[in-house]
Image: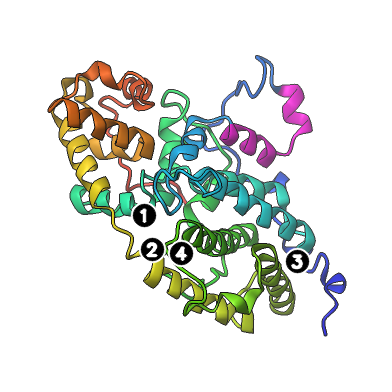
């Protein structure tokens, strides 16, 4: 029986040193983190702590509260939205990083920012934009695009290179094995795993909450414990043990990792893929038509605009269409994109290209 206490700080020698950051891609003399003169704060805060502060205060992070995690616009306040999922990723990544001795400030910044590029309706929205735009839409890439070219009236958040890399590389939608990229910073791999653990058990709970699945069922969920906390703890301990043994972040070979792979496959087959988004598609179709014909949006990529909308706004637009064939532009005055559009016009921002020099 392995004593977890003996594995504390097992990866401390691999922690990314904050002072070795490649820095911010657009170095500015004045960042205005808090006041006009930011130098006092800059000297006292870790650069990745500053990134977290920037992300928490950005518009894209606020929009996550009205974006789907799995089930669109739930009536039950206990069902996760994308912002709550983000916080649950942080709640796993932060203690795991500190226990293993990795850079918790970097993990925190990546966790906060990892999903800011999501379209409305989660992965369905991602698939919709890819299919109809003819270009691959990936929320991880779009997250970097938003951070670099859309936030702060188009000037960008100016995040550290490593934070942007973490946002870009956190997704493993098409990787059932959760392969660890050996040349990747350890903190990026850690947040990637925290993301998967956070959504797997939470999404299962929410599916039960809305009556989408019943117990008992064919899943192997009980292999991890009886409750959410015990299930997360099981994976936490397994990651610590396997990572310490392999000398890098790893969650592939243990019995728990193999069970987790089976659970993720079950979630895709029984929950994610079968959800019917026909109503959402009809609303997105109408919105796309409106964004391409309304002169106010000339010079903007309609698919990029779609990605910036929340579920709530898409449904609200659908309701407008039920009362008026073509809604007046004034009816969208409370939509978030209305204050962003002026900074997007004629910018030729490509949501499929992150622009990072990795």
Label 1 – label 4 distance at C-alpha = 12 Å
For residue 217, side relative to residue 239 (left or right): left
User: Mark 3 or mark 4: which is in front?
Assistant: 4
Q: In the image, residue 133 lies at what x, y percent?
A: 20, 47
Residue drawn where x is 34% and y is 47% of the image: 353
Q: Earlier in the sequence, mark 2 or mark 3?
A: 3
Task: Please say if 8 is above or below 163.
Answer: below
Quarter containing the N terminus: bottom right
Instruction: Between residue 80 and residue 180, name the one nearer to us.
Output: 80
Q: Which residue is mark 3?
A: 11
Residue drawn where x is 79% and y is 32% of the image: 44
Question: What secondary structure is the magenta-colored segment mainly?
Answer: helix
User: Mark 2 or mark 3: which is in front?
Assistant: 2
Local secondary structure at mark 1? helix
Label 2 – label 3 distance at C-alpha = 34 Å
Q: Which mark is residue 172?
A: 4
Q: In the image, residue 292 lies at what x, y percent?
A: 16, 32
Tell me, yes or no, whether the two marked residues, 2 and 3, touch with CB atoms within 8 Å.
no
Write down the region rendered in magenta: 39-56
Mark 1: give few (<14), some (14-19) or many (20+) Cα within 10 Å. many
Instruction: Between residue 50 and residue 322, name the one nearer to us.
Output: 322
User: Mark 2 or mark 1: which is in front?
Assistant: 2
Tell me, yes or no, whether the two marked residues, 2 and 1, touch with CB atoms within 8 Å.
yes
Q: Which mark is residue 123?
A: 1
Q: Earlier in the sequence, mark 1 or mark 3?
A: 3
Q: Which residue is mark 2?
A: 272
Label 2 – label 4 distance at C-alpha = 15 Å
Label 2 – label 1 distance at C-alpha = 9 Å
Label 3 – label 4 distance at C-alpha = 23 Å
User: Mark 1 or mark 4: which is in front?
Assistant: 1
- Residue 207 in view here: yes
């Amino acid at each position: 029986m392995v004593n977890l206490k003996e594995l504390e700080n097992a990866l401390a020698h691999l922690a990314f040193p904050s002072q070795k950051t490649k820095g911010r891609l657009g170095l500015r003399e004045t960042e205005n983190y808090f006041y006009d003169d930011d130098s006092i704060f800059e000297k006292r805060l870790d650069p990745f702590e500053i990134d977290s502060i920037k992300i928490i205060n950005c518009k894209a992070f606020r929009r996550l509260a009205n974006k789907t995690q799995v089930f669109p616009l739930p009536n039950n306040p206990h069902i996760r939205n994308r912002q709550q999922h983000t916080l649950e990723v942080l709640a796993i990544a932060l203690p795991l990083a500190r226990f293993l001795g990795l850079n918790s400030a970097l993990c925190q910044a990546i966790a906060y920012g990892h999903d800011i590029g999501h379209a409305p309706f989660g992965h369905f929205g991602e698939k919709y934009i890819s299919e109809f735009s003819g270009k691959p839409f990936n929320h991880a890439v779009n997250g970097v695009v938003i951070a670099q070219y859309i936030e702060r009236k188009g000037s960008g958040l100016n995040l550290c290179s490593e934070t942007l890399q973490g946002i870009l590389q956190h997704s493993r939608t098409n990787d059932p094995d959760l392969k660890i990229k050996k040349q990747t910073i350890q903190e990026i791999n850690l947040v990637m795993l925290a993301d998967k653990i956070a959504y797997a058990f939470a999404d299962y709970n929410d599916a039960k909450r809305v009556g989408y699945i019943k117990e008992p069922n064919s899943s192997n969920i009980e292999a991890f414990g009886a409750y959410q906390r015990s299930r997360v703890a099981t994976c936490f301990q397994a990651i610590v043990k396997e990572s310490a043994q392999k000398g890098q972040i790893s969650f592939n070979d243990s019995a728990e990792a193999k069970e987790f792979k089976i659970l993720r496959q079950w979630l895709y087959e029984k929950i994610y893929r079968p959800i019917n988004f026909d109503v959402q598609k009809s609303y997105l179709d109408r919105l796309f038509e409106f964004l391409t014909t309304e002169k106010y949006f000339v010079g903007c990529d309609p698919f990029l605009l779609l990605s910036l909308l929340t579920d709530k706004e898409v449904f609200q637009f659908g309701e407008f269409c039920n009362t008026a064939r073509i809604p007046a532009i004034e009816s969208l005055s409370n939509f978030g994109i209305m204050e962003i559009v002026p900074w997007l016009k004629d910018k030729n921002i490509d949501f499929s290209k992150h622009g990072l020099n990795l």
